Image (spheres, rainbow, N blue to C red):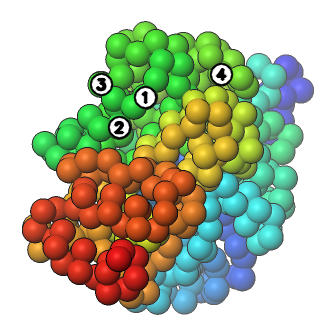
Amino acid sequence: MQEYRQMYEDKKSTPKEMAKYVKSGDWVASIAALGEAVTVINEICERAVEEDLRDIKFMKTWMIPMGGRYSDSDLEGHVTPVSIFHGNQDVRQMVKTGKADYFPCHLSQHPDIWREVRPRIATALVSPMDENGYFSFSTNCLEGRTLAEVSEVFLLEVSPNVPRIHGDAFIHISEVTAFCETDRSIPTVPLSEPSEDDIKIAGYVAERVPDGACMQFGVGKVPDAVAPMLQDKKHLGIHTEMFGTAMYGLIESGAVDNSMKNIDKGKTVFTFCGGTQEVYDYLNDNPMVAGMRVDYVNNPYVIAQNDNVVSINSCLEVDLAGQVCAESMGPVQYSGTGGQHDFVKGAGMSKGGQSFICVHSTAKGGTISTIKPMLTEGAHVSTPMNDVDMIVTEYGLAKLKYRTAAERAKALISIAHPDYRDELTFHAKKIGLMI
């Protein structure tokens, strides 16, 4: 312990000093979402402008805004954001206007991207060092270990206000180049407020979830609405990319005990999380949860090792062939592929597995149908038709897997908004999907 404590003192620094490690042309990687070392990143940006550093690529999985100044106009030419998943408006606008770049990929591929790009600098927000010299990557475990393996310089922001999470989620002081201490807290992510239609959709899903199912929830109001409907279930398990307040509620209710899982039995497994302070308190130093790398959690062959996997995700639109777009408005990138297809594929290979893709039947105040004859021109296919299992709207559930093209089209039309069913039937016949 004395050796590690001396290393700690030797590597303790300030954000201003840490920024000096960065030079023109560097790729600077940041841990995803809530794991961003905002204090360090902002200091790097300040130095880039003050000392005219050029062509620095700042690469991150954007999901939740953390306060970093990566979108400030004075950074143009100095720092260019590169998004692996952009879930906030700043980054969407920057990509749309050509001021930021984007990596199309499945979430499970993120570590392979880091291995390909090999950023020279990596940054992360971590919990304090333990007596054995380890910091925890806390709420974002999906890529920290990979970045520790491929980067030349690893810079940490250490805060006592972030939870220490078990799993494949640690970095040793010997792997750290420098760090600063702050008292920054991570944002809380409360439950969303579901609409009446969200609750209807959730009901169709919940009634098909058996006791002993292994759950994955995506982001959105429908998964948050499903969770309370499952609190009377028994022996549920959790193997999910994102862990949040809704899933914590299932644990608190007693519905989740992870006893029926074939792998990681007894443990809740995830790769990143965001929730209320109560959730963070539950996760802190809890040996019954495991934050693991995303190429483990989202690997379809790992997912499929558990029986009765239930995957719940959402999308923007579906066509009558069953192709799903969850990430773009036509050709304009809106978010990212994320882990939807990873879990659809994994659930499809799981014994007794089911996957649900949920969508409101209309958008833009009811003026357009989200079930369409063909996807909007230029739309990106997030989940191909051959892997889709079930599509759910507030009008019901359409089972597509192992159905003919005509059966799939009829099923989708039956859950479309009534105002659009005749038009969809006309187009289905016109393009040869129905006789």
Label 3: state its secondary structure: helix
Q: Earlier in the sequence, mark 4 or mark 1?
A: 1
Q: Residue 202: image x %, image y %?
A: 28, 38
Which residue is under mark 1?
Answer: 209
Q: Amino acid at mark 2?
A: Val
Which residue is under mark 3?
Answer: 228
Q: Residue 333: image x %, image y %?
A: 43, 77
Q: Going 84% across and 53% down the picture, which residue do you hit?
A: 149
Residue in the foreground of this view, choosing between 177 and 299: 299
Which residue is under mark 4?
Answer: 261
Viewer can see residue 413: yes
Asked if disc 2 and disc 1 are in contact, CB closer than 8 Å, the reply is yes
Q: Going 18% across and 78% down the picture, which residue do you hit?
A: 423
The quadrant in which residue 8 appears is: top right
Q: Going 12% across and 62% down the picture, which residue do you hit?
A: 418
Q: Amino acid at mark 3?
A: Pro
Nearer to us: label 2 or label 4: 2
Q: Residue 205: image x %, image y %?
A: 35, 37
Q: Is residue 17 left or right of residue 163?
A: right
Q: In this picture, is 45 found above or below 170?
A: below
Quarter of the image that includes the N terminus:
top right
How many angstroms separate mark 3 from mark 2 (CA)?
12 Å
How many angstroms separate mark 4 from mark 3 (CA)?
21 Å
Which residue is under mark 2?
Answer: 205
